[in-house]
Image (cartoon, rainbow, N blue to C red):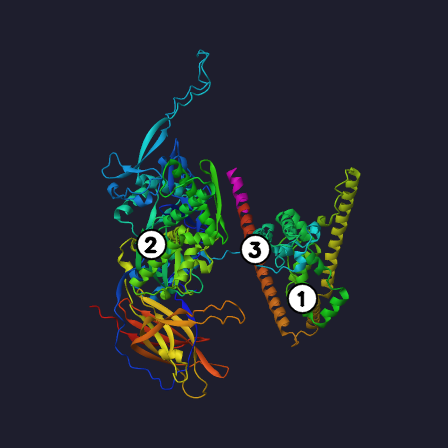
């Protein structure tokens, strides 16, 4: 695997214990936490309940507060005191929050004191103040009343009260519990955290989150864009077949929205070429489709009418809440195995139990429309920047709904070529693999926290560069692909290579941030002859990338003779798309004479190393040198002037 | 660090018609403004380059320096195993039966057979950890088809039990099977004589390792070792002196017969104990005798002894000869020395004589003065009285 441009080799940790930093993915429905292992890898950890996916829910029940997955069942009986979906409301004014959604949890209300602020009102039981301690027997004088009880005065009943919480307060309570879980796992105090935030978070949302983190006493090292966190996993543990320079499509299908990014990853440096955020496609739609499917199934089996999404009455509402909890399990089973998944709810409605199984095909059939909507959105995004699916080298999935294998399959059946590397083709989705969409963000954040914790405290300027809007982050990028052509005798060579007149070696792909360096090594055939100087020549070209579409008629196999079904087999046309390169500008050429050729099977050969360096202003330095067993030969250089800045 | 991408291509031979085109003075296409995501080690490296205005080469150099500095601070990053290393495990070793632990070579089980009695406590600890990591039954839980899974692990635990206790380790060191084998290979007097007669170097080749081996049993350390062919008389004598009075800590408890555990019979126990004690004493005596015969043998064939004797003889003869003819040219040095000595002695004598004469004179003068005073007193006394 090629290493990131200029990144340091993994230095040995100074102590056996790494820094006590964590990564937090704070989603709208689920959150996850990741810590660094002894080896320096990021690992998603489970909280005290053994949950790696911690539901973003806070429930108040009497004197108790339930946080996480324990709070979810409260949605059935105690919905009005259970708060969910609060992350997306961070920083929003009360007037900005849409009110048309069906209410399945504690409703958002106008804060009684602050103007235009969203809040939740929950009923709690205020614990009664502890009574004054009964005098201890040792001090009690003998003259005390004989009837005096030795037992302490019992606490009086807690009094019912109402508590008003702002969205920030709820977030703070939740974040605090996440950090506590990490602390319990690590066995020491958390020194810093990186929190992933969605790209659409505006200033007020950020400010609200910052306030919540401050209240929860978390030292936040960086609020990291979700796309950044996800790309870091791809950068640090890439698939073996991937080049260090690639275009990556990030698909984040969350419960509330779909966010897509086309990322340019060049030797570890990442930027977003294009991105989109779409609330009209989301994981909730999948849930709704499945809820309706199961409700219909229930009605069919029990003859009890059940209407969900939206529910008609209280009983339906309860049934829906129960079904939602069970659905979570069904979705996970479908993601994890190729077989059928069961869905069972006890006493769903009118005391009737519901028990069914759904297989992968049926499941995907229900969700098909959501899958295709995702792929269509992705294709639209690529088109907007002049990319074709064929130019995508890798797809990364983020979010619980993206772990459904049906989505990945839909990508491949809708124009994305087989060569695209996804976590599913790599097999890294399950078993805590590196591509697991549910824990990807948290792990990315933990790795970023490690990078930040490794910067010495005195290098303020470098620390500052990780803040938003740093001048170091703004760079120039190339707009055309650059590379060398090793000329070939066209008359000898086959016609395929004839397009470019030689062997193409990629130097600098388009959309590459500058400065940039790439070093490649390859073997050169030097021909058969015995006399004369042996040379390697190369032309530096700028090329444009295109796509060649070929329609290949696939004739089906001849039906075997004697068979009765002699339907007319239609010849199916299949589109074959291929990447093409067209020469545009020749920038120069370079010649290298070889002094250390090796004879192999009667032909001479040598190894050449070519280095492409593009300066931040666009000046190219092409260096070629021979590699032989004793070292490196004298370099030959070609310099192209920087682009004149207008 | 600069990473090199190796391409699986083989460039075609350069066509003869090709010639390098002159620099076209064109530049690459227009650049676009982009914003990097501030994430990952590559961005950190980018910022470092940008802040310090480094080129890629400068940055590489800087990183290399950092790495070296880091290495110096923390070592090479690998944990120091104090030279324990990894020894190969033969199938025989792995097939050991933990019930027969008394017969096993604990050092071999621990992978310390290159160190043996020289292994320190820390080394034993490290070696044990290494072995446990490899052979713990939990590690082998998945591998099916092995019924006798934890046998070797038990052997390892037994070995640790013995080697971690100084007393028990000393007992085992006393009868270390590896060295016991070597002891039985000590050459017989006839063999040794033959070998040494052939070449005096053989003596050192044979006996140096033997004495080095035996030295570990000595209560007093350091032990004088065999030494070199041209050692002086003193060194050789002190060597043999030490080894004839060799004080060994070697003991033979490890070879004791087990007291029959099942029997409560006190007499039985006592009987076995008594026997064991007698056996130990017998072995100890045998061992002492063995060392003595070894030293005897060494002494008898030591080429240095022969040489020293020869030298002494020569010296005596030379003296004799020197007496016979004083001005012989054969021993001018000895003559010279004798002359010098004689002269010195004479000078000394003279000096002494002179001293004596002076003393006498002084005494005489003092006596005379005394006499004179007495005479004076005698003369004046009656007058005063």
Q: Check if residue B379 falls in the magenta segment.
A: yes
Q: Which mark is residue B204?
A: 1
Along the line of sight, the residue nearer the viewer: A600 or B74: A600
Magenta span of residues: B375-385
In the image: residue B279, left or right of residue A582: right
Q: Eyeballing the image, is A360 above or below A306?
A: below
Q: How many marks?
A: 3
Residue B122 horizontal/vertical position (percent): 56, 51
Element marked by disc 3: helix
**Chief secondary structure of the magenta span?**
helix
Mark 1 crowdedness (10 Å alpha carbons): few <14, some 14-19, many ≥20: some
Q: Please identify the quarter of the rendering in which residue A77 is found.
A: top left
Q: Badge 3 is on which residue? A: B359
Q: Badge 2 is on which residue? A: A259
Task: Name the residue: 44% across, 36% down.
Answer: A350
Mark 3 and mark 2, same subunit?
no
- Check the picture and name the quadrant holding the C terminus of chain A: bottom left
Residue B247 seen by the camera: no
In the image: residue A350, left or right of residue A258: right
The numbered mark 2 sits on a residue in which chain?
A: A
Mark 3 crowdedness (10 Å alpha carbons): few <14, some 14-19, many ≥20: few
| Name of the residue lying farthest toward the front | A564
Q: Check if residue A188 falls in the magenta segment.
A: no
Mark 2 crowdedness (10 Å alpha carbons): few <14, some 14-19, many ≥20: many
- Check the picture and name the quadrant holding the N terminus of chain A: bottom left
Q: Which mark is residue A74?
A: none
Task: Name the residue: 53% across, 44% down.
Answer: B377
Task: Name the residue: 57% across, 57% down.
Answer: B84
Whichever of callouts 3 and 1 sits on the residue coming sooner in the sequence is: 1
Element marked by disc 2: strand
Pointers 1 and 2 in contact (C-beta within 8 Å)? no
């Amino acid at each position: 695997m090629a290493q990131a441009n200029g990144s340091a080799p993994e230095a040995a940790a100074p102590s056996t214990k790494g820094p006590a930093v964590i990564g937090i993915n704070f989603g709208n429905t689920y959150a996850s936490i990741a810590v660094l292992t002894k080896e320096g890898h990021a690992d998603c950890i489970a909280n005290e309940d053994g949950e790696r996916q911690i539901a973003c829910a806070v429930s108040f029940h009497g004197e108790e507060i339930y946080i996480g997955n324990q709070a979810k069942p409260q949605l059935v009986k105690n919905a009005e005191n259970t708060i969910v979906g609060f992350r997306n409301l961070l920083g929003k004014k009360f007037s900005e929050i849409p009110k048309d959604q069906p209410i399945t949890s504690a409703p958002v209300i106008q804060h009684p004191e602050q103007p235009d602020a969203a809040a939740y009102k929950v009923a709690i039981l205020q614990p009664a103040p502890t009574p004054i301690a009964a005098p201890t027997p040792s001090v009690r004088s003998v003259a005390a009343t004989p009837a005096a009880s030795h037992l302490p005065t019992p606490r009086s009943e807690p009094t019912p009260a109402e508590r008003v919480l702002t969205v920030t307060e709820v977030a703070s309570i939740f974040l605090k519990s996440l950090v506590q879980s990490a602390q319990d796992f690590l066995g020491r105090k958390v020194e810093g955290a990186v929190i992933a935030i969605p790209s659409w978070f505006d200033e007020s949302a950020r400010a609200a989150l910052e306030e919540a983190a401050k209240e929860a006493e978390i030292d936040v090292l960086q609020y990291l864009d979700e796309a950044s966190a996800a790309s870091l996993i791809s950068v640090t543990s890439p698939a073996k077949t991937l080049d260090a320079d690639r275009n990556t499509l990030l698909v984040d299908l969350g419960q509330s929205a779909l966010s897509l990014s086309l990322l340019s990853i060049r030797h570890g440096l990442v930027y977003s070429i294009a991105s989109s955020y779409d609330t009209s496609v989301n994981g909730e739609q999948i849930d709704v489709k499945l809820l309706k499917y199961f409700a219909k199934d229930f009605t069919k089996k029990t003859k009890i009418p059940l209407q969900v999404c939206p529910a008609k009455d209280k009983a339906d509402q309860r049934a829906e809440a129960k079904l939602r909890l069970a659905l979570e399990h069904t979705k996970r089973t479908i993601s994890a195995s190729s077989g059928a998944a069961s869905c069972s709810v006890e006493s769903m409605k009118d005391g009737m139990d519901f028990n069914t199984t759904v297989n992968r095909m049926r499941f995907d059939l229900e969700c098909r429309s959501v899958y295709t909507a995702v792929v269509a959105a992705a294709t639209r995004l690529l088109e907007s920047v002049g990319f074709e699916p064929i130019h995508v080298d890798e797809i990364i999935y983020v979010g619980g709904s993206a772990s459904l294998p049906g989505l990945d399959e839909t990508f491949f059946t809708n124009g994305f070529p087989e060569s695209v590397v996804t976590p599913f083709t790599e097999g890294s989705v399950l078993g805590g693999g590196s591509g697991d969409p549910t824990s990807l963000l948290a792990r990315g954040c933990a790795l970023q926290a490690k990078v930040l914790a490794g910067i010495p405290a005195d290098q303020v300027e470098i620390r500052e560069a990780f803040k938003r809007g740093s001048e170091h982050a703004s760079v120039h990028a190339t707009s055309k692909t650059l590379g060398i052509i090793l000329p070939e005798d066209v008359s000898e060579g086959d016609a395929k290579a004839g397009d470019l007149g030689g062997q193409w070696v990629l130097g600098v792909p388009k959309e590459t941030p500058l400065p940039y360096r790439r070093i490649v090594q390859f073997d050169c055939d030097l021909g058969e002859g015995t006399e004369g100087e042996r040379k390697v020549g190369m032309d530096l070209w700028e090329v444009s990338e295109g796509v060649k579409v070929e329609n290949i008629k696939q004739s089906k196999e001849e039906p075997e003779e004697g068979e009765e079904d002699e339907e007319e087999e239609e010849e199916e046309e299949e589109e074959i798309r291929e990447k093409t390169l067209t020469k545009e500008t020749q920038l120069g050429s370079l010649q290298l004479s070889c002094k250390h050729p090796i004879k192999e099977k009667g032909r001479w050969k040598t190894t050449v190393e070519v280095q492409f360096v593009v300066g931040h202003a666009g000046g190219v330095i092409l260096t070629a040198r021979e590699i032989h067993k004793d070292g490196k030969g004298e370099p030959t250089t070609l310099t192209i002037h920087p682009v004149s800045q207008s | 660090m600069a990473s090199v991408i190796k391409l699986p291509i083989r460039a075609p031979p350069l066509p003869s018609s090709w010639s390098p085109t002159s620099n076209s003075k064109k530049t690459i296409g227009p650049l676009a403004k982009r914003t990097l995501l501030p994430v990952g080690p590559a961005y950190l490296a980018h910022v470092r380059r940008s802040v310090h205005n480094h080129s890629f080469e400068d940055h590489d150099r800087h990183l290399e320096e950092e790495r070296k500095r880091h290495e110096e601070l923390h070592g090479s990053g690998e944990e120091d195993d104090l030279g324990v290393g990894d020894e190969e495990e033969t199938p025989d070793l792995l097939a050991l039966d933990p019930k027969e632990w008394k017969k096993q070579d604990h050092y071999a089980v621990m992978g310390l057979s290159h160190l043996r009695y020289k292994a320190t406590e820390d080394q034993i600890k490290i070696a044990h950890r290494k072995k446990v990591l490899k052979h713990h039954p939990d590690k082998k839980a998945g591998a099916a088809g092995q019924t006798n899974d934890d046998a070797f692990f038990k052997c390892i635990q037994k070995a640790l039990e013995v080697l971690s206790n100084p007393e028990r380790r000393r007992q085992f060191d006393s009868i270390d099977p590896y060295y016991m084998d070597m002891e039985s290979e000590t050459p017989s007097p006839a063999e040794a004589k033959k070998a040494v007669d052939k070449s005096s170097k053989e003596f050192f080749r044979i006996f140096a390792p033997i004495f080095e081996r035996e030295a570990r049993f000595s209560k007093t350390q350091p032990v004088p070792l065999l030494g070199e062919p041209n050692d002086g008389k003193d060194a050789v004598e002190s060597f043999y002196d030490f080894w004839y009075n060799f004080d060994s800590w070697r003991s033979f408890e490890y070879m004791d017969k087990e007291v029959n555990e099942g029997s409560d019979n006190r007499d039985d126990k006592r009987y076995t104990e008594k026997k064991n004690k007698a056996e130990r004493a017998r072995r100890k005596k045998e061992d002492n005798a063995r060392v003595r015969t070894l030293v005897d043998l060494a002494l008898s064939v030591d080429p240095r002894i022969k040489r020293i004797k020869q030298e002494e003889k020569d010296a005596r003869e030379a003296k004799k000869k020197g007496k016979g003819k004083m001005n012989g040219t054969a021993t001018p040095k000895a003559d010279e020395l004798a002359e010098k000595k004689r002269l010195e002695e004479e000078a000394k004598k003279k000096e002494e004589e002179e001293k004596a004469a002076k003393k006498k004179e002084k005494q005489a003068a003092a006596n005379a003065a005394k006499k004179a005073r007495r005479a004076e007193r005698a003369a004046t006394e009656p007058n005063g009285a």
